Image (cartoon, rainbow, N blue to C red):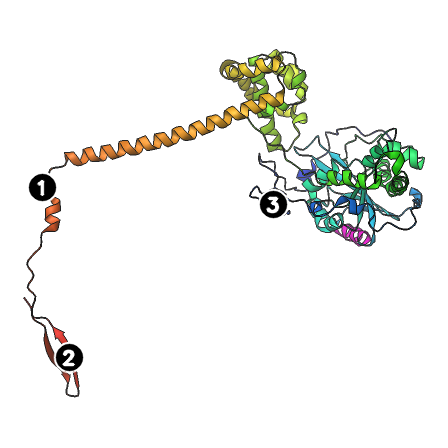
Amino acid sequence: MASIPFHIPSIPKPQDTYNFLIDNSNSLFLHPSLPKSPDGLGRPIHPAEAYDPVSFAHYHLPASLGPIKPPLMESTPFKLVDDVAGLHYLATKLALAPEFAVDLEHNGYRSFQGLTCLMQISTRTEDFVVDTLKVRASVGEFLGKFFLDPSKKKVMHGAINDIIWLQRDFGIYVVNLFDTMQASRVMRLERNSLAFLLKYFCGVDANKEYQCSDWRLRPLPSDMVKYAREDTHYLLYIYDVMRKELVSGSKQLGFEDPLGEVCKRSHEVCLRMYKKEVFDKETSYLFMHGLGDADNLDAKQLAIVAGLFEWRDRVAREEDESTGYILPNKQLVEIAKKKPLKARELLDLVGYSRTLVLRDVDQIVEILWAAICVHAPNFEKVAKDLNSGVPISEIGAKIQETKKMDQEHEKKMAFIDHQQESEASKRKGMALLALLPQPSTPVNQLCRRRLPIRRPPLTDTTVTISPSFKLSWLSVEKM
């Protein structure tokens, strides 16, 4: 089968096909299912924080540490899970499994935050590939509890990204992880890749042809399904072998408890929390990959970078596209260097295949003109610092501190203005009162005048209502 490219433009966007609910707003990702810290900061508390990772090292460790070899892939039951019924079936299998292996396939090119396209899961006896594009809304509901269960070992390789993708797309948080990449580092193996571990421990030559393919493709070709299964099919066996060597090789590895060390490091991976990218007008452009390698950008060029970066971020959120798809960093810097001030010059520079640049070309040209003619003076100091080798983090910190001081100054001036307006309004009111005609008798004296009051004597009077009923009351004689 021919190789599958990194990007297939003809694939409809899954976000539209399956009506994904995605929040690309310029706000923090709040992890809504997690409790928050009681310190007033509202920090999400990861479920794994409640456990000591070393306790997972020897939890339910069998007396025999002999690795359990997996059956051949060809003879292993396999199920493609692409509906709720399939998720229910998978859940029944995970409920019985003391451990399971997990891997994800991801696409970050045609969405702002990225999309998990596949989830591969293997138990000791079965392989599953979950089409997470089709059943995205139900994955967390059916599978989340098994990832949380501290009694079940989750085996993954290089899970540093998978952990946050699970949180972002499915609200899944992992407890009790064994990361085979962390184990390979503790064991000081020659290399840490999964391909190396497959060859080293299993004698399997991994086919990495599809590692960077467009995993949004549907239906999945059989070769891509085989590749996906391979990532988890042997992983539990690799875990067995590594666990045995970690337990028996304490002295050689230089750790008192090498297995406990792997669990600690894996635990730290678990505790990573997904953070959505938040745009800051004053500093975000400084951290754009590749900006530090640009040669001596002047204030005008830096103003162009900042303006284009802001436009690109806004469009990426609105259209749910990656910033690299809209306008790669390299081309953005090239525009800043050459400063094309006409639409045709701009398109000749970046090409006519950038559909969103083509759509907004007139707006982009206006951004370039404004950057050069209006905003450039504001970037003189930043350009000087960058060209002098001042670290970007330090420049960003200075800008944020200046911004904070400016905001405090604005608040103070707003309070002073309010006070001055109140005083001016009070003086104006007093002046208007002074202009009113004064009465012959002062108002305060009129309010204090009293009329003479005659106090009549009180008498006891009886009024006859009926022959059998009389009412006594106090009457006051009329003046």
In this orientation, which residue lies closer to the viewer: 446 or 38?
38
Query: Is residue 136 within the magenta segment?
Result: no
> Magenta: predominant secondary structure element?
helix
Residue 314 placed where, x, y %?
58, 29
Above-or-below relation of 189 to 389: below
Q: Amino acid at mark 3?
A: Ser
Tag 2 and tag 1, C-beta contact below 8 Å: no
For the record, the magenta segment spans 84-94
In this orientation, which residue lies closer to the viewer: 51 or 386?
51
Residue 93 placed where, x, y %?
82, 52
Tag 1 and tag 3, C-beta contact below 8 Å: no
Whether residue 134 is visible here, answered yes or no, is yes
**Residue shown at 11%/77% (left/top)?**
460
Whether residue 308 is visible here, answered yes or no, is no
Q: Which mark is residue 439?
A: 1
Please report whichever mark, 1 or 3, sits nearer to the chain's N-terminal start. Answer: 3
Q: Cα distance, mark 3 to mark 2?
A: 74 Å
| SS of the residue under disc 3 | loop
| SS of the residue under disc 1 | loop
Determine which residue is flagged by label 3. Answer: 37
In this orientation, which residue lies closer to the viewer: 109 or 134?
109
Indicate the quadrant where residue 456 lies: bottom left
Indicate the quadrant where residue 442 lies: top left
Residue 6 placed where, x, y %?
77, 28
Q: Which mark is residue 472?
A: 2
In this orientation, which residue lies closer to the viewer: 208 or 37?
37
Query: Closer to the camera: disc 3 or disc 2?
Result: 3
